Image: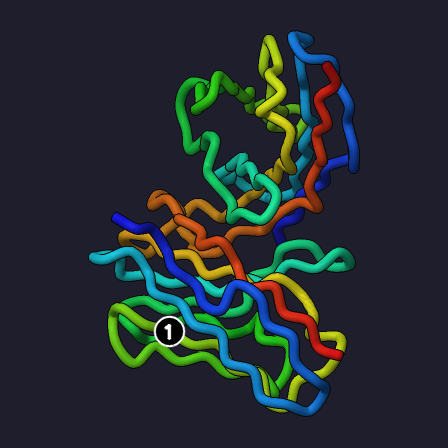
């Protein structure tokens, strides 16, 4: 069965600082990997996804993530955080030919000015 | 497009009452998903439909929960009778087709509180 671990429940960064949110997955084959963002009172919005090919994927809002098979990781990064990035971020994994997403517990990002 | 529409946005009810949550997927989308989000269990898939047919309901917690999709533009999630442990945010999502290669678009959610 697939599973996702996001080891950091909360992260606080200063505006303009770089950001890295960690995600580790468990799956027997190469999975589909996703990062979603949820602003307060809103639904989830897809930031980026990895299916195959280049292991560094670019997403919306200046985010990127790198798939590292050897570490079973798919960490999300942003070089310079903006106050509007404060939200909860979810990593998710799915089977290559499946239809179901398994989500991590989420990481709440706080941005201090 | 208006996106995925859910109603109501907030629902407060008493234990034992029937609760019906509603979802209108994005027009033209053939797959619809119901998720539940709680502090304890995170975000879980309850059930999903493809072309109005339930494909996988293994995430539905118990028989008190039921979901229907009578047509391509409407789905309901019903809890009868409701219990305090059902308190959660319920999300509906839709995608163009089956398969994770198709992005799931989420609605704003319904926050359910069962007293």
Residue at horizontal 66 percent and vertical 45 percent from the top: A104
| Residue B76 in sight in this render | yes
Locate residue B62: give its quadrant. bottom right
Left or right of A22, for residue B40: right
B103 vs A83, nearest the viewer: A83
Residue A27 x, y percent position in the rendering: 61, 44
A101 vs A28, nearest the viewer: A101
B14 vs A44, nearest the viewer: B14
B11 vs B79, nearest the viewer: B11
Element carrying mark 1: strand
Residue A100 x, y percent position in the rendering: 48, 56
Residue A88 x, y percent position in the rendering: 65, 37
Residue at horizontal 58 percent and vertical 49 percent from the top: A41
Q: Is residue B41 above or below residue B103?
A: below
Residue picked out by circle 1: B75
Residue A2 x, y percent position in the rendering: 62, 50
Residue at horizontal 43 percent and vertical 24 percent from the top: A60
Left or right of A37, for residue B33: left
């Amino acid at each position: 069965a697939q599973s996702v671990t996001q080891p950091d429940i909360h992260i606080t960064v200063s505006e303009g600082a770089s950001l890295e949110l960690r995600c580790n997955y468990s799956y027997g084959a190469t999975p589909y990997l996703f990062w979603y963002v949820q602003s307060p009172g809103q639904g989830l919005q897809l930031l980026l996804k990895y299916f195959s090919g280049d292991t560094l994927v670019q997403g919306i809002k200046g985010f990127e993530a790198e798939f590292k098979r050897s570490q079973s990781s798919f960490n999300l990064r942003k070089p310079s955080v903006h106050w509007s990035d404060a939200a909860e971020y979810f990593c998710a994994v799915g089977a290559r030919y499946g239809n179901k997403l398994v989500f991590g517990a989420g990481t709440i990002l706080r941005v201090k000015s | 497009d208006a996106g995925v529409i859910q109603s109501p946005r907030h629902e407060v009810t008493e234990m034992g009452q029937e609760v019906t949550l509603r979802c209108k997927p994005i027009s033209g989308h053939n797959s619809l998903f119901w998720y539940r989000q709680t502090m304890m269990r995170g975000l879980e898939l309850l059930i999903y439909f493809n072309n109005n047919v339930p494909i996988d309901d293994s995430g539905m917690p118990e028989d008190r929960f039921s979901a229907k999709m009578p047509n391509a533009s409407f789905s309901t999630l019903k809890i009868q009778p409701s219990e305090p442990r059902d308190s959660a945010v319920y999300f509906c999502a839709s995608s163009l087709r089956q398969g994770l290669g198709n992005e799931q678009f989420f609605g704003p959610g319904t926050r359910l509180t069962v007293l």
